[in-house]
């Protein structure tokens, strides 16, 4: 034995298994000892690092830095989330709520602040597109109602008897001429108004 030393037993903060898992890349180092003159093999030098000691020192020296960086990262992530919420999520929620409460022939109403902040971004374009689609839908529905009213009037006042059947060949509607042909007194329920 070339060197021997003793040190008092220390208490470590971390267990062997935790130190081994955190410092798993740190391995035992071995090297052969050879003498030059006279030439002979003297043995093997093994260096086994005490991982618990190293981990205690790392945490003792770097814990304030780790804590500061963790606090900084959490604060930055919170600020980014807050900005994202107010710039995207909250306006999108208001737009969705406005769309879900729309009635027929209603305008897509949002607070003036929405237009002030989102006039030229994606949310503003989305609002513009929804407004145009809603306007076209209302025009199409109005045209459809006028067409339906016209068709009802034509059918009702036609001189020929007209029977409307469903897919099961059941009579759903008849006009006044059909009622006169069948000598039936028509009720309004046979040809209900919408």
Image: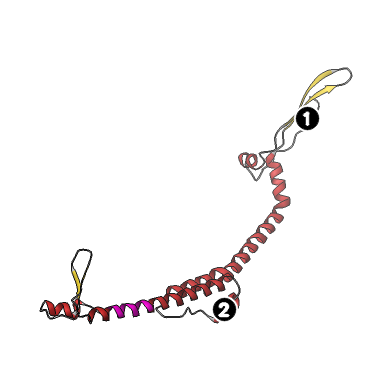
Q: Are marks 1 and 2 in contact (CB under 8 Å)?
A: no
Q: Which residue is mark 1?
A: 4
In the rendering, at what x and y percent does residue 68 appear?
69, 59
In the rendering, at what x and y percent does residue 112 appear?
55, 81
Closest to the observer: 147 or 191? 147
- Does the rendering let one see residue 51? yes
Number of marks in the image? 2
Using residue 112 as the reference point, say whether residue 20 is left or right of it.
right
Q: Which residue is mark 2?
A: 115
Q: Quadrant of the N terminus?
A: top right
Q: Quadrant of residue 91?
A: bottom right
Closest to the observer: 51 or 130? 130
Mark 2 Cα within 10 Å, few/some/many (few <14, many 20+)? some
In the rendering, at what x and y percent does residue 115 appear?
57, 78
Q: Residue furthest front?
A: 159
- Residue at figure coordinates x 43%, y 73% from the top left: 100
Closest to the observer: 36 or 7? 36
- Residue at figure coordinates x 72%, y 52% from the top left: 62
Q: Quadrant of residue 158?
A: bottom left
- The label shown at residue 98 is none
In reply to whether residue 179 is colored magenta, the answer given is: no
- Does the rendering let one see residue 101? no
Q: Which residues are magenta?
A: 143-151
Using residue 129 as the reference point, say whether residue 194 is left or right of it.
left
| Cα separation between marks 1 and 2 | 80 Å
């Amino acid at each position: 034995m070339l060197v021997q030393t003793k040190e008092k037993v220390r208490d470590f903060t971390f267990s062997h298994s935790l130190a081994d898992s955190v410092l798993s890349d740190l391995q035992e180092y071995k090297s052969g000892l050879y003498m030059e003159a006279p030439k002979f093999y003297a043995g093997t030098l093994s260096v086994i690092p005490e991982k618990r000691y190293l981990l205690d020192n790392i945490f003792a020296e770097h814990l304030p830095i780790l804590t500061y960086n963790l606090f900084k990262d959490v604060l930055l992530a919170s600020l980014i989330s807050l900005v994202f919420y107010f710039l995207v999520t909250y306006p999108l929620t208001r737009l969705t709520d406005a769309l879900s409460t729309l009635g027929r022939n209603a305008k897509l109403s949002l607070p003036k602040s929405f237009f002030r902040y989102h006039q030229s971004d994606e949310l503003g374009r989305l609002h513009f597109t929804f407004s145009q689609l809603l306007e076209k839908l209302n025009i199409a529905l109005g045209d459809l109602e006028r067409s339906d009213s016209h068709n009802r009037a034509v059918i009702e006042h036609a001189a020929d008897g007209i029977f409307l059947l469903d897919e099961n060949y059941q009579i759903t509607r008849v006009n006044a001429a059909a009622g006169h042909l069948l000598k039936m007194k028509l009720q309004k329920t046979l040809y209900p108004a919408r």
